[in-house]
Amino acid sequence: MSDEINKKIAKDFGLDNMDSREQEEMVEKIGNLLFESVVERAIDVMDEEMIAEFENTVSEAGSDYQKVIGFLKSKVPGFNQIVSEELSRLKRATAGIFA
Amino acid sequence: MEPDLNNSPQKTEIKYPDGYENWSMDDKQKFEGSIDKLNPGELEDIHIKEDEENEEDQEDQEEHEEINTPEIVEIKEATDKNGEVIKIGDEVAWDFYGGSDNGKITSFVSRGSTVLANIYSDTEKELEINVGNIFLVREPEKVEIPIAPTPEINNEANDMPEWQRGKEWVEFEKMRYKRAKVEVEHRKIAGFGKIFIDEITLNIKKNNKDFQESSDLKLEKEDIYNYQKNIIAKRIEETFRKNAGENLTPEQEAELRSKINSKIFEELVQKENDAYLKSLKEARGETMMGKAIESAKSLLGTKTMQWYLSLSRKQRMALSFGVGSIAGLAFGATVAPGAIGVASYLTWRAARVGLAGTAGMKAGEWANKKWSAEELEIAKNKEVEDLKNSVLSLEKKSKGFEDIEKRYKKEKIKMTLKKMGTTIAAGAGTGLLTGLAEHAVMGAGGVTKEAMESRDGKASTIQESRLPRKGFEPNPVKASIPEQAPEPTVPKVATPEVTVLEAEKLFEDPNILKHEVVVGDSTWKILKGTLENNEQFKGMTEAQKTYVLSNLTNKVLQNPENYGLNKAGSLNIGDKTDFTKLFENTKEVNGVFAKAKETIMGGSAQEKSILLNNEKIAAWVEAHPNESLGEDRVTEILNSKPEIKVAPVPEIPTAETSVSEPELVPQVEPEPKLQANNAEILAGGAILAGAGLAAGLSDRAQFERGLEEDRKRLQVLEGGRDNNKPESVTRNPNLERSLANDLNRAKNGSELDLAVKAAKEETINHFFTEGLILKKEGIKSKKWRFIKDLSFKKLEKYYTGDSNMSGLNLETTNELNKSNNYKDFFEHVSWLKDQTDGAVILAEGEDPSIESVLEERGRYLLKNPQLAKLKKAA
């Protein structure tokens, strides 16, 4: 990730005061939470057929994570909205609490 | 150290939140329920004891991020919140959101922060379950209520973190859970995955009391929750600082801050997220979805997280926040809370220029922005989301939501008008065509019938289309999409000085302007009947008439009561209409006539467009005689693209599969050698009454139809003629035989074909069925659809010869490389050849699809079950 994006992430999640190593660790944790909640939300809108397709995609993705992203973006209705909402939620969760 | 709830009293008094007595009954019930759901022994916080070796392994993985090594750590021991050790072999019951089961823990595995327990169940399934979903069976009576310890307990629990001591923490935990429930409740009402309806602009939901209450609750409680959260964060920091002492070096200070933040994240962010996810999953159980789907979703979530955690750290980061990541475009679209602490909503909005891209637009930019419906919706949602995240007061947020609602509503109207203008430029407006649609319905007698069949026998109301009140000004020059929404001009309302006498100029007999509504009438129809008495109108083309009628119908609908229609623009049987006023201003009406003639020339794009739309609507009405035709439907019909007709592709266009006679099986009635092309092979198949079945007929009725078709074919072959085809095409001497024999064979053949079909499907399902959680039959899979038409010979060359010379294109080979299923399936079909003792071979020049080969070999083997090899294989 570029420094610019790192800075933006750090700023948006209220990690400005942390040093870069700490920021990096924190962003990783947030990324994990983001992915999990986005996936849960995405799965919620899936019908039977899409569940099977998604499972198949995950099974075959290996390290090709773009496959999974591609699936979610193209198949899950309102996916961008879900991501946006989950990002917002996590930003709210981290806002103004760190030392 | 975590609180030891075993030392807590058997019964702990529930501390209800402030203002609890004022909550609605529903909220109270939900709150009580939320306490009940926190079962004793729930493994919310697992303490992992990893051995040093594993830690080292993890470090190694960090150093080799590029290598896709799953960060899987075996856990030797885990303890629950009560401090009890959970051991391998312990019996547990797990809740999989829709049911429960029993099993024994066989191992613990950690992938990152997720701890999974492998459980071997009574149903002989090895399952990996997130321990957050496991509930221990044993000793559930130990703790009655799983709330955090009361202050009294805290005094005894000296090892409890300081920030967890005192009632604030207890209150905070309750609030956190309650808040998560409310947030999920919102999403559920708004529709999972759909747009999260904003909390304030709930006009459309105002009758939904629960939703309103929970919305208000959320907003009011949010500030309190955040306040509490900040207090706890401060307490965590104080605790760590107190223990760290004073006069720290910069390095020590940095380390301390890192520890503080890590703990704050764990206590406040991670746990808040856990509560949210838990609520999200619980909400699934409350929906109408089937239990199987519910369980499948739960397991799929776990499986996806397992996959995610198997990625390297770098990959995970790239996935979440990198270029093209899930956050992707969404990232940065929302403003961080607290980023703009401004005094008013308008200031806040102005300050967002450049942040969200739309909300801060200057008036001119906003007005000139060319929105699409999707853009408009996205922009609105972003604004709403950003406003929700802002630190503005509730009152200011309310005003802000109102402002957003108004602005976007206005923009939507403008966009709709623009669309109309577009259609107008192309020859017809939506309103125009709604009138036309109505006309089509009237013409088809649909409404007449409905009116006649009204249950109570009273006069029925005839629905008039209530579409745009604007008139239609075709643009004869520019048929493209206008950049700015044109304001279609409305024919001016009749002016007072115009006298009734002027109407007489348009019609010889002014009485024809008056009409009593009868069954089947519509404004369109009445106007048309009236205008046919005008020589100018009478001489117009259909498209020109359509234009005029549309224009006038819409004018009528602007002020329906002026013409004897009811306020809603509807007509009732027996109503007396009077269109005198409509034609009072002859100058205006003549202007409409002139415009129609001027712009809708014979052969012009406008004419074609109108006629095409006429056809579209007429076709739709014909195809949907029992469906209503509203404005949305008309828009949909008119916006539908013409269907691209593709010449039907024969199932086996070129393959010529020869089936040679099996010499070793004399007891089997020999098949005639088929030398015809594939079309004829299919016909031959049809003789056996199986072509239809082989092609996928799914029910008995279809089967019967197929058989009937076969009988006809047999008649042709028997010597009769298919009147539709020349003899040279329909007669095939190789296929001729007696009718009686063929009918008999048809019967046997149909049975064989059924068997072939079943065997074929079973084979395909074996190789291509997808999904372990929710199975998707192979026959319906994308992989099967991909491979079934591929040339068997090319596949053979690809898999067994020089793959570069196979003749398969790059796209195909790329797909084949993606999965071993393809290869396995090919090998199976190849293997079948051996089972036939070489009786079914591909002759030179033949190039059948792999599906054909499978079918032919399968058919042969089913007809010759005595073949030893097949038996052996079976």
Image (spheres, grey):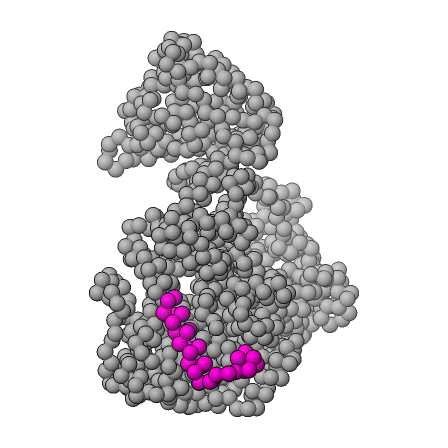
Q: Which residues are magenta?
A: B226-254
Quadrant of the rendered image containing residue B314: bottom right
Quarter holding the N terminus of chain B? Answer: bottom left
Q: Residue at x 57, y 91 (%)?
A: B53
Q: Residue at x 43, y 20 (%)?
A: B492
Q: Is residue A97 magenta?
A: no
Rendered view: B33 above or below B203: below
Question: In the drawing, does residue B116 fall left or right of residue B690?
Answer: left
Q: Residue at x 64, y 56 (%)?
A: B652
Q: Main secondary structure of the magenta part?
A: helix
Q: Residue furthest left?
A: B21
List x then y, in percent, for residue B700: 45, 57
List x then y, in percent, for residue B191: 40, 57
Of A5 and B853, the residue lying toward us: A5
- Number of residue marks: 0
Of B804 and B47, the residue lying toward us: B47
Quadrant of the rendered image containing residue B558: top left
Rendered view: B700 above or below B480: below
Q: Residue furthest front?
A: B247
Rendered view: A45 above or below B767: above
Question: In the drawing, does residue B850 fall left or right of residue B336?
Answer: right
List x then y, in percent, for residue A52: 50, 66
Q: Is residue B393 visible?
A: yes
Q: Residue at x 64, y 68 (%)?
A: B818
List x then y, in percent, for residue B510: 36, 11
Question: In the drawing, does residue B281 fall left or right of residue B849?
Answer: left
